[in-house]
Image (cartoon, rainbow, N blue to C red):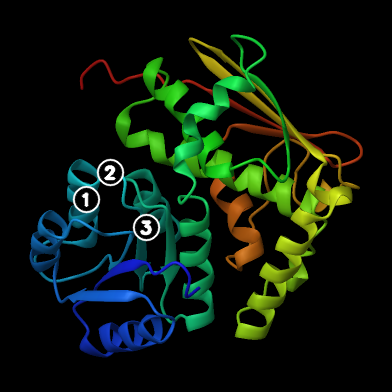
Amino acid sequence: MSDPTYNLLIVDDEPSIRKLLSDYFDSLDFNVRTAENAEEAMKLITTNEILDIIISDIDMPGMSGIDLLRFSRETRADVPVVMITGLKTLEYAISAVKYGAQDYITKPFELGDVRKVVEKVLRYRKNSKKQNELYTYAQSLSVNFEIPTDEIDAGVVSNYLAKKLLNSDFCQQEDYHQYYVAIMETLINSIEHGNLELPSSMKGTDFEQIMAFEELREERIRTAHYGKRMVRIGFQLSPMRFTLTISDEGPGFDWKSYIADDNQIFDADTKPHGRGFMLIKHIIDEVYFNTEGNSITLIKEKEESDPLS
């Protein structure tokens, strides 16, 4: 990932972790800055004009990584944050996403896993200039898109739809990011495993597997058979519910091993290819697939506000 050069801030109170990640991303031609605590990181965030991504530990002395995350969202909302946690609990990881993290990594980690997460976050951020182009695809007020795979930007679409939820008061600012992530993970599955037919088994952690996956992904996007397949998105929003249906033109998959009889997602593992389902499980109320397995519908009821809050 040497072209273009990205500016990365690493925040961790453990010198060994800072050095490990700093040396690793420096070898990948990133411009790397480091901070040993949240307070030092805040100064860098406010003074460093060029910053593309932040990797921060959650559990640090003094101000926590969550505190830093909130500060970053308030001052540099355009800069994505990836959290590192040594607490292998789903609740801690989900809370980081809820407060604005784009993704998370659990300790102990492999460098290949960290690179994979960073590349995914940057890939779906870099084309944010396409935001205004979404209006050219809109077919109705209920929001329907039909976008070729080689033109879709999952990050832009996810931001657009999640902002609909936020601006309509369906959710609060602190909930925006969890919906953004749920929508984006669903779109990525439709694009990569649906239209591009990239198998989950290719998502390894070593360099060769990562590069093979990315090379095949780019190759298929350039191939009309895959790249011109359509992604169809239907989004309906009412004051108390939203429904999102995403369909692709791929061969579909056997979804029965993921969805229970009550339309809830089974517990998924924390491997890279299971992370999307794991996040969706804790955000969305109901999940449906069509028979072929190439169309998914997410349903979420608006949470009632606490009258005492």
Q: Are marks 1 and 2 in contact (CB under 8 Å)?
A: yes
> Mark 1 or mark 3, which has the lower sequence index?
1
Q: Which mark is residue 253?
A: none
Which residue is labeled 1 in the image? Answer: 72
Residue 58 lies, with reference to residue 229, above or below; the image says below
Q: 246 above or below 224?
A: above
Does dot 2 land on a helix, a strand or a loop? loop
Whether residue 149 appears in this view of the structure is yes
Q: Which residue is mark 2?
A: 77
On screen, residue 261 versus residue 117, left or right, reads right
Residue depicted at x 75% and y 44% = 259
Q: Please, what is the three-letter code of the amino acid marked with disc 2?
A: Ala
Q: Position of residue 64 (x, y in %)?
A: 18, 61
For the point 41% across and 15% down, which residue is it? Answer: 168
Could you tell me how far apart the alpha carbons at marks 1 and 2 are, in whole angstroms?
6 Å
In the structure shown, which secondary structural element does the residue marked by tag 1 occupy? helix
| In-front residue for pair 198/32 | 32
Q: Could you say which quadrant of the image residue 234 lies in? A: top right
Residue depicted at x 42% and y 52%: 102
Q: In the rendered structure, find residue 92 and report the number of the disc placed on it.
A: 3
Sequence-earlier tag: 1 or 2: 1
User: What's the residue type where badge 1 is placed?
Assistant: Ser
Q: Residue 229's spot in the image, x, y percent?
A: 83, 41
